[in-house]
Image (cartoon, rainbow, N blue to C red):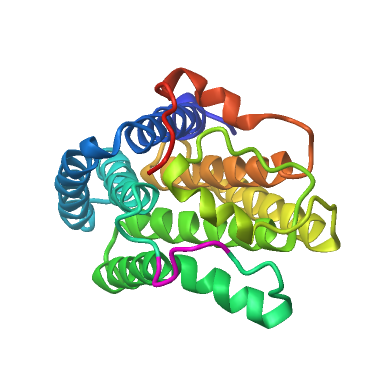
Amino acid sequence: MVSWTGHVLPVIATIVVWFLATGLIAWADNRERRTFPRSLKLAGIAGVGGLAVVAWSMNKPTLIGVYAAFAGAILLWSWHEISFLTGAVTGPRREACPAEARGLERFFHAVSAVAWHEIALALSAIGLISLSWNAANQIGAMTFTLLLAMRLSTKLMIFFGVPNMSTEIFPPHLAYLKTYFGPRRLGAELFLAIAGTSALAVWLGLIAINAPEGSASASGASLLFALAALGALEHLFLALPIRDGALWGWALPSRRPAN
């Protein structure tokens, strides 16, 4: 049975956090580059704080513990996102993809453009999983790992090519990364990704509904369900002519040419 505490509230909380966090990151990464050091410092403090919150909540399988773990993972994830979108942590390759690159050569160039960021995310996920392996509350590690899986899927889809690539919130100083985007096409891999992410969301939703009403486990599963559903929606946006980037137009400062 669907309950306010165990199901509805976690979904609302996830949507609000997703919307505001994405807007804040877009705002910070599209400002003048002289503001980036302070943004990175503040994001770093938030990320370390988020890690501390996840560690604190691991042995607290309560409603407060579940929400704290979720929030801590989001803070840590936001730190990684800001470090990437400011250009501080991207990859060894910081130039456009050669026009003649094809197949594996193009793939290796694309990986080189984002390698350090992906490695940092993977190490963080491994660290959180190891930290909470036998803990009573593993929502923090699950949240971060789910975000990582959704992000990797999205990046692969964009590399292969999708019909709709909304780049409104993409910062100008990373414009060279757009050369690694695939052609505008609707391929079978995007259908599979949409089906896979949707199936994951449904599975998590069923876990949430079957959990004891109003319990911490129901809230935790509902938080993960909402996150997976948003990930599936973002995959769907790649196939439909919808400018999802317009959702965060309020957060974008006046654009200036990249250096």
Q: Quick check: is 231 in the magenta stretch?
A: no
Along the viewing direction, whichever of 150 and 134 lies nearer the viewer: 150
Q: Residue furthest bottom?
A: 104
Q: Above or below — where is 234 with respect to 193? A: above
Q: Main secondary structure of the magenta part?
A: loop
Q: Residue at x 14, y 46 (%)?
A: 45
Task: Please provide percent x and percent y for residue 55.
Answer: 18, 58
The part of the chain drawn in magenta is: 91-96
Task: Please provide percent x and percent y for residue 103.
Answer: 73, 78
Q: Which quadrant is home to the C terminus? A: top left
Q: Residue at x 49, y 57 (%)?
A: 146
Image quadrant in which you'd find residue 36:
top left
Exactly how many numbered labels are in the figure? 0
Q: Residue at x 52, y 44 (%)?
A: 227
Q: Residue at x 27, y 65 (%)?
A: 135
Q: Quick check: is 93 in the magenta stretch?
A: yes
Along the viewing direction, whichever of 33 and 114 lies nearer the viewer: 33
Q: Residue furthest top?
A: 250
Q: Above or below — where is 166 with respect to 100? A: above
Image quadrant in which you'd find residue 42:
top left
**Residue 126 located left or right of residue 12:** left
Q: Which quadrant is home to the N terminus? A: top right
Along the viewing direction, whichever of 127 and 133 lies nearer the viewer: 127
Task: Please provide percent x and percent y for residue 56.
Answer: 15, 53
**Residue 257 located left or right of residue 202:** left
Task: Please provide percent x and percent y for residue 220.
Answer: 42, 46
Q: Above or below — where is 223 with respect to 111? A: above
**Residue 73 located left or right of residue 151:** left
Is residue 5 visible in the rendered image? The answer is: no
Along the viewing direction, whichever of 240 and 142 lies nearer the viewer: 240
Is residue 201 visible in the rendered image? The answer is: yes
